[in-house]
Amino acid sequence: MTDLSMAKKAGTAAFDVEAIRRDFPILDQQINGKPLVYLDNGASSQKPIAVLDAMDRYYREMHSNVHRGAHTLGDRATSAFEGAREKVRAFLNAGSTREIIWTRGTTEAINVVANGLAGRLKPGDEILVSHMEHHANIVPWQMVAERTGAKVVPIQITPQGELDLDSLNSLLGERTRVLALTHVSNVLGTVNPIAPLIEQAKAHGVITVIDGAQAVPHFQPDVQVLGCDFYVFSSHKLFGPTGVGVLYGKAQLLEEMPPFQGGGEMIERVSFERTTWNVLPYKFEAGTPPVAEAVGLGAAIDYLGDLDRNGMEAAENALLTRANELVESVPGMEIIGTASQKVPVMSFKIAGLHPSDIGTLLDQQGIAIRTGHHCAMPLMDFYGVPGTARASFAFYNTLEEVEQLFTALQKIQRLFA
């Protein structure tokens, strides 16, 4: 039983940061002689004991390949694997597990969609993406555009880091075939208003692909309410293991799309004359799937389901609010991205300091952040910077850690003043 579940059993507050932190053993260590302050959650979040135990139990008690084993371990593994798929379905409120495809992560999921839609594209067609997209939601579309003669067209953003809706309105037209947008920017923390944008795209017959990698750690999307055609995310940002991700797609579109890879589970029948494909979702799951990782993701979803989600969001908002209040305490510090709707992500620069130097000096004080272009070079070009420093918070971070970050930044700024 985790500290969180024990706290709930004892009748204490459902959202208790100190109890939650005890569920994440990696947080209880020192780096360079200082207590670890982990503020790199946008790159990859940490894993609760419940996830570690679920994967350990899978390997100790039920490991086998899935679906075709005529033995007890195969049945156990298949049950756990498909049970995890159902947990993802419920998490997204998809209509059926047929619409939940396992991938290696968000990047592979977008590649599956882009390649699957290539047959619908012809010269002159347009794929709209925004200036704030991760490379994973730009490059696959460029590759498909090069093959088909279509064109990738960027939607502008405002200096505050919000979508320029006038730009979108001017671009969305009869040539538009795909609208591919991030739900939440990995650099800016901006939460895009995707529901009305999806509705607008549907009115033009445009297929919508939503990158939810940075959204799912902070709130739970409902794909039926959103109405998107595809929604993708990675396990390792949702407090689950690396190596597995999710592609949600509307069943009709998935049925029409060709498979991305061949071999293994994705076949129905093979002969040298002709091969036929398996039914959904297996049509897109070639080879041995990430069974243990899927089980781990299912455990992460269960863990999040036990949290007070309103309390979690309030705690994260408090972290960002306090961080914003402390910006003026560091001379020369400038925030990149000041959208009105944000998750707790803070990208910044400090006059006279290179982002990588900031990251190195923070690490010497036990504080982990990310620096560089964050796989968003077009966004860096928009702001005229080579990169930024980025602190990204999760519900297990504390207000004290926010204070420690800014105390450390003040020390660094004084050192180089």
Image (cartoon, rainbow, N blue to C red):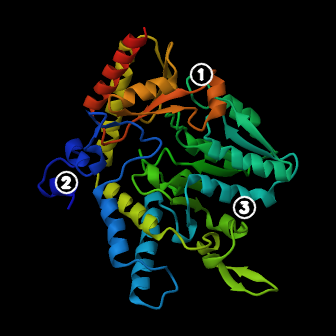
- Assign the C terminus to one quadrant of the image: top left
Label 2 environment density (alpha carbons within 10 Å; few <14, some 14–19, many ≥20)? some
Q: CA distance from mark 3 to mark 2?
A: 44 Å
Residue 124 image-quadrant placement: top right
Q: Is residue 266 above or below residue 319?
A: below
Chain-order first, disc 3 or disc 2? 2
Q: Is residue 94 left or right of residue 301?
A: right
**Residue sitting nearer the eye, 253 or 18:** 18
Q: Is residue 281 left or right of residue 92?
A: right
Q: Secondary structure at mark 1?
A: loop
- Name which residue lies at 62% across and 28% down: 380
Label placed on residue 116: 3
Task: Identify the residue position indicated by label 2 in the image.
Answer: 3
- Name which residue lies at 42% across and 65% down: 87
Q: CA distance from mark 1 to mark 3?
A: 34 Å
Q: Nearer the viewer, mark 2 or mark 1?
A: 2
- Assign the N terminus to one quadrant of the image: bottom left
Label placed on residue 183: none
Q: CA distance from mark 2 to mark 1?
A: 43 Å
Q: Secondary structure at mark 3?
A: helix
Q: Secondary structure at mark 2?
A: helix
Chain-order first, disc 2 or disc 1? 2
Q: Position of residue 88 (x, y in %)?
A: 46, 63
**Residue sitting nearer the eye, 395 or 230:** 395
Q: Amino acid at mark 2?
A: Asp
Whether residue 178 can be seen here? no
Task: Identify the residue position indicated by label 1 in the image.
Answer: 159
| Residue furthest left in the image | 10
Chain-order first, disc 1 or disc 3? 3
- Name which residue lies at 25% across and 29% down: 400
| Residue furthest front in the image | 32
